[in-house]
Amino acid sequence: MLGGLRRIRREIGEARSIRVWLFYLPGPGPWLMSWLRKQWVIFRNPNAHIEFQGPVYLGPRFSIHAPAGGTFVVGPGVEFRRGFRAELQPGARITIGASAVFTYDVLIQCATTIEIGERCAFGQCAMLVDGNHRYRDLDRPMLAQGYDFRPLRIGDDATILTKATIIASVGRRAVVGANSVVTRDVPDYSVAAGVPARVLDYFGPERSASSTATSG
């Protein structure tokens, strides 16, 4: 009896190992699963316009929630590794530029427009949202007060690190530190971090004396 149980457990373990090995083996397996996920999210959201332009990899637990419509457009070479989620309100539009990378459990919630540039990188559990809860009316519950919305843009080559929350635009090649909350626009070539995030460094082209004087 014990020998039979050991043999069954060993066979189950071997089967699991083979399955894992086949999944990570270079070849068509992961891309086949990615293609099936694309068909599934399109099928599940018949009222939305979902477009993948060129080769795009959708990892496990990729999902789009757009039951009442919306537009989701992805450029070529984008990688969604695992657990990506996009939620769109009617008329919302999310566009993602070529070669962007989303690591694990990234969430995007959109009611207006969120535009993500090319080659952007998003760390684990990063969140982008174009709306903020109203809360100042003391005569109504917070959940009954609605939202303030504004379109967001993430510039080309921007990096959003782990668990950052983005509710304002981020400039070209800007870096947002882990666990930050971006409530004001981050300029190009800047490093921003904190709650709320503030600009800590600028590493872009040198500003001319005239532009520095004007900005000051």
Image (tube, grey):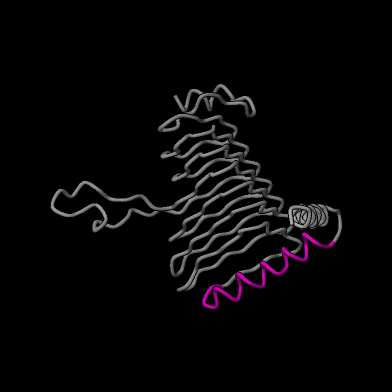
Q: Which residue is rendered at x = 61% and y = 58% of the image?
A: 61
Res 209 quadrant in image: top right
Q: Quadrant of residue 183?
A: top left
The kind of secondary structure the magenta stretch mainly shows is helix
Q: Is residue 60 above or below residue 90?
A: above
The stretch of residues the image draws in magenta is: 28-48
Q: Position of residue 110 (x, y in %)?
A: 46, 58
Measuring from the top left, give residue 91's x and y in whole percent.
46, 69
For this view, does 143 lie left or right of residue 8? left
| Residue 131 percent coordinates (x, y) | 39, 53
Farthest left residue in view: 139
What residue is rendered at 47% in x and 44% in y? 166
In the image, residue 42 lies in the stretch drawn in magenta = yes
Camera-nearest residue between 195 and 183: 195
Note whether residue 23 is visible: no
**Quadrant showing the C terminus:** top left
